[in-house]
Image (cartoon, rainbow, N blue to C red):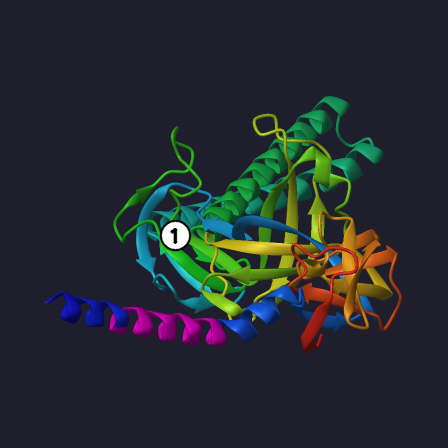
Amino acid sequence: MKRHVAVQTLIFLIITGLLLCCSRQEQGPKAKQESSGTAPVKVMKVVRQRISEKMSFTGTIEPWRKQTITPDIGGKVAQIYVKEGDRVSAGQLLAEMDTETLRLQLKQAEAGAAVTEAAFNDAKKDKERMDRLLKEKAVSEQQSEKVKLAFEAAQAQRDQAVSGLNLARHALDVSIMKAPFGGVIASKNAEVGDVINPMMGGFSASSGVLTLMDFSKVKLVIEVTPNDIGRIRMGQKAILRTPAFPSRDFEGTVQMVGMTAEASTKKFRVEIATENPDLVLRPGTFGNILIEVNSRENALVIPQNAILENRYVFVASGNKARRREVTIGLQSTTLVEVLSGIQENELVIVEGNFGLEDGTEIQITEEVKQ
């Protein structure tokens, strides 16, 4: 029994020794490789190209022009010829008020003007005749003065009647609402039969009959802090991006820079104009704007991920990594301008550079292209 146990123990020890030997043989090359201290890295060639520095903001898209269509006079809405979403051209008839009373008033004013015109012409003839008789001393000055006063009264009555006629015509004209510019009917704010009185208290800009917008061109309104407003100028180029069209860039231009900060936010209002001929940019939605505040042609640039602690890079020199102190200039979202510290066509390490030390042996696994 003891002999049998001894044999089993011996076999166990032999098997364990063989397994340990195999394990060491398998780990040997790997351990040797790790002990060599060679770090795999990816590099990129330093090149010269244009770089631009951009600032990012989020703002609201607004129409280029917006107007509430409202009659100048109060009354009942008789007809609305368009609906929400319709495209209209400048001068197109949109709606009109009930004009029956206005037309009757116009006829009355025309009749009154005709009567006073006839009376004026008769008084004018009397005055002309009296002036001739006065020169011939056939009438007294008192008689002439009486005729002159009658003429002046007839003239005043005629002028008053003409003013009333013009007022009646104007009331009829403004009861017919036409589009002041081409655009899209953004909203319909009234129905046929509603009474509109713009002179009443509580009347708001959205209380009119219709709201007309022109957003064939839009403006993105952003708020800029006092620290950044000095870098934004009229005419700067901008790129507008929206969640609805993530792969499409809309080109714009800074067209207004506020001179005073808003009292509540202490920020400055800036507007960026963007063409929108296909009307895909909708007012009231949000957009992200990138404003190019600075740019430089033929700059020496490297990727952002090559810069460590914002002050040094590692350059591949043969099979070693060399640390270089650098001075950086403009920065974009992906690139950095290097003013000093490296030369064109050198290879900077862009991956595997964390944890490196000056003189570390490296193995270049890939040269990444710009």
Instruction: Label 1, secondary structure: give it.
Output: helix
Front-most of 123 and 94?
94
Q: Is residue 102 above or below residue 306?
A: above
Q: Which residue shows up at 10% across the image and 67% down it?
A: 1
Front-most of 57 and 14?
14
Q: Which residue is mark 1?
A: 103
Q: Is residue 122 above or below residue 330?
A: above
Which SS does the magenta portion mostly show?
helix
Q: Position of residue 257 (x, y in %)?
A: 71, 44
Front-most of 352 and 350?
352
Q: Position of residue 119 (x, y in %)?
A: 56, 42
Question: Is 42 on the left-hand or right-hand side of 62?
Answer: right
Magenta segment boundaries in residue numbering = 11-26
Whether the magenta-drawn stretch holds residue 14 is answered as yes
Front-most of 25 and 277?
25
Amino acid at pointer 1:
Arg
Q: Which residue shows up at 31% across the image and 74% down it?
A: 15
Q: Is residue 40 above or below residue 283?
A: below
Q: Position of residue 76 (x, y in %)?
A: 31, 46
Whether the magenta-drawn stretch holds residue 158 is answered as no
- Which quadrant of the figure has residue 217? bottom right
Question: Is 7 on the left-hand or right-hand side of 322?
Answer: left
